[in-house]
Image (cartoon, rainbow, N blue to C red):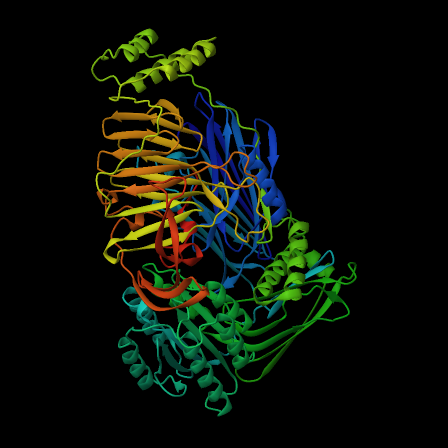
Amino acid sequence: VNGIEIYSMKIDSKVTSRFAHNVITSRAVNRGNVSKEVFFDVDLPKTAFITNFSMTIDGVTYPGTIKEKEAAKQQYEKAVSRGQTAGLVKASGRKTEKFTVSVNIKAASKVTFELTYEELLKRQFGKYEMLIKVKPKQLVKDFEIEVDIFEPQGITELEAEGTFITNELQNTIKKTFSGKKGHISFKPTLDQQRTCANCSQSVLDGDFTVKYDVKRTTADNLQIVNGYFVHFFAPTKLPKLSKNVIFVLDTSGSMSGRAMEQTKEALLKILDDIKEDDFFNFILFDSEISTWKETLIKATPENLDEARKFVQHISTRGLTNLHGGLMRGIDILNAAHEENLVPKRSASIIIMLTDGQPNVGISSTQEIERVVKKAIDGRYPLYNLGFGSGVDYGFLEKMALENKGVARRIYPDSDAALQLQGFYDEVSNPMLIDVELNYPENEISDLTTNSFKHFYDGSEIVVAGRFVDSNQNHLTVDVRGEGADNALSYTTQQDAEQTAQAFQEQQYIFGDYIERLWAYLTIEQLLEKRITATGEEKENLTAEALALSLKYKFVTPLTSMVVTKPEENEEGIADKPTEGIDIFTIVLCLIFDVPLKKGFNVGTVLNMYLKNLLSKPGMCVVYAKLLFLVKLISIKPSFITKSYGPTYHTYASPPTWYTSVDGDPHFIISVPQRRDAICFNINENPGTILNLINDPVTGITVNGELIGDKRANSDAKIQNSYFGKIGIANRQLNFKLTITPEKITIENGDEKTGFTWLDSVTLQQAGLTLIINRKKNLVLSMGSGTSFVVVLHQVWKKHPLHQDFLGLYTLKSDKLSEQTHGLLGQFFQPIDFTILEIHPGSDPKKPDATMIVKNNELIVTRGWQKDYRRDPKHGVDIPCWFVHDNGAGLIDGVHTDYIVSSLF
């Protein structure tokens, strides 16, 4: 693609006792005759930790370094200030996050990227699952996925499938397993990768999933290696416990429409799965609280039929009394236990679903957390499901973890009902409650979590620890739990020699896997505990997790991997000379206003000739002199105008609709019918590229790259970031415009023309007009009628913190198609909102309110943003409603969905 050939991509996975060690190696070569930028971006599971990265260019290796986040940030900013960039990890999907790095390599040069990450595979529905994201973006001569699995207990089943696998590709998946070993390979040929016989597009785009399970002759398995142990507990063939489920459902106005229809669809399927021995109830909350029944009800066929009718008639209205709904559910469950309405040996759970934030009754999230924790008092888990992006997910997660549950985000897609039902399925079959795994206190240190409220069918409990005496080679474990009929107890003994015998066949698995598994699990649980901790406890947890992350080289929320690239060379030009017009002809035309041959554009011809010059040796001086000469020439307005006073682009009439992004970066969305505006900020790291506008019909895209301050501001919680580069492309015209605070570059196919902000220029060609207003702004008008205004913000050159940046404004955006999207583009179609409950906020001058927009209920703040179109220096204050948390609930999806790997 674009002269860059990825000629090899290998994904090598080695799994030992559920712990996966994955290495992705990609090799590329620059087949072009000029330097090119090569991108390496891969999606990896969110549950994984990156442990290593390197790139090798022409035999020289540039490794990534894992450092504490603040130290890494300083190294990153230092690299950026030198014109280098670094690899970044960003969330990119439901289960994945994207690692991206790019590097400029010379013509004919080769680069090898190698990324290593590790994860503990979790068991769900009776199987371990490993997800490998496959997206090479081009045909790859040597593409291979290879998975080796070693399980001391033995493998009972092994399967591999891909969302992109066709009937022809199915035969390329080779899998074998016998005893303790399993092997999977997938190696499609070039022709098998094609979307059709003569196509150059690759069919390899999607998820490749490996699933397996192990033999279970006993309830658990214990392994000891080099002073560490891991204990897997997953008893089978136990009678199921009956369960008591309270569904607490948000029925506020923002849940109307598709969200509620999908919720009802899921609930009806869940009712089909509820067992007759189970008890259940529904609590609905909007501005008011309502219940289906006053107590828990047994799941008899008659009661289930009545519940289905109740669910079908659920309607939405009002605001969000989350506290009231949750407390009513807790009270009903507590009363059922106190009054012996439910079996003593049963598992109780609360499942709450909401798409908004509390704004009626108690709206303080801290207060809600406190009273809920006190009311539940550790008796049963609370599971919080956050529907869409308008929720305060941090609040839901903290409250769930404080009450021995988990939080899960439900994505508002076509499969939202399946997501809801899938979560219920995970917790629908409790087998044991109050599970305790006990180890000799005087023998074990640094034990991971060993107490669990529930054990669910098809899952597995994993505990790891370190021996006080690293030479100890034996361990006795006692496990206790409450089952459906009685209390259960298991005792297991193991020594290092038995483990060694089990691993005799093992040759290709890394040796310190148990120690790394222990470190992985410990860090994961320390980070989880941090969410609910405060003060000194949080500081201690942070320090411990950080120390382990650095020791074992894991990229975690406390560490970063910085990949500093080599100094990048200037791109050379080696195009074939274009005949037809002499340099002196061009100069004479410009001076004497002599018309050129029909169809020749001065800027184009000049650019073509300069490329011709540069293809010859010894022409740099001529080129420099020519540039100086051209700067002294006054060129006629039909092509290029130069003036020495300030010029402004004037608008024929005030726009009825515009969107913009300016400042740090502040997005302003006009809502003309409300005579008002909505605004939001995007907080991301320097170097991040955001997709602002993408119209697949007209082929117009606009992307922006962020820059930061010259150095970090120690007084600011969130560091400033601005747009330092904007790229506008029109695919149909084969046109690209790159704008930075220093220069403006136009690319027409293979022709490239450059200007600076000291020029005043009008450039016309078929389908577009470009106007540069000296040191002020740039206006690009497309043939469709759409216009973009890029404003230059210049700061004092010796300012200790800030640097020059850009702002983007769009006019007549309704000329783009209805399929237009992007952080700005999604708002080119009319949007409406409703404001409710205006009340004092934390700033007396800026009241808060509840906004209903896109079926989401958001807490917003009244404020102002600057419009710099007419006055780039001071701007004009635009009143607007500010949406917090990177536009969550206002923009489609989450802001990280709009991160792209390159400017074009």
Residue 272 location, quadrant: bottom left
Q: How many marks?
A: 0
Give the farthest residue toward the front.
645
Residue 704 location, quadrant: top left
Q: Which residue is rendered at x = 43% and y = 11% of the image?
A: 625
Give the farthest residue toward the left.
598
Left or right: 419 as drawn, with respect to 52: left
The answer to whether residue 443 of the structure is visible from this angle is: yes
* Figure check: 840 above or below 274: above
- Please state the horizontal and vertical placement of residue 633, each as a whole percent of the image: 34, 15
- Please state the horizontal and vertical placement of residue 32, each as a whole percent of the image: 43, 23
The answer to whether residue 448 of the structure is visible from this angle is: no
Q: Nearer the viewer, residue 288 or 125?
A: 288
* Figure check: 816 above or below 433: above
Residue 626 location, quadrant: top left
Q: Which quadrant, please, contains the N terminus?
A: top left
Q: Which residue is rendered at x = 36% and y = 83% of the image?
A: 291
- Please state the horizontal and vertical placement of residue 422, each as a whole percent of the image: 41, 66
Q: Which quadrant, please, contains the C terminus?
A: top left
Q: Nearer the viewer, residue 789 or 101?
A: 789
- Please state the horizontal and vertical placement of residue 835, each as a whole percent of the image: 31, 65
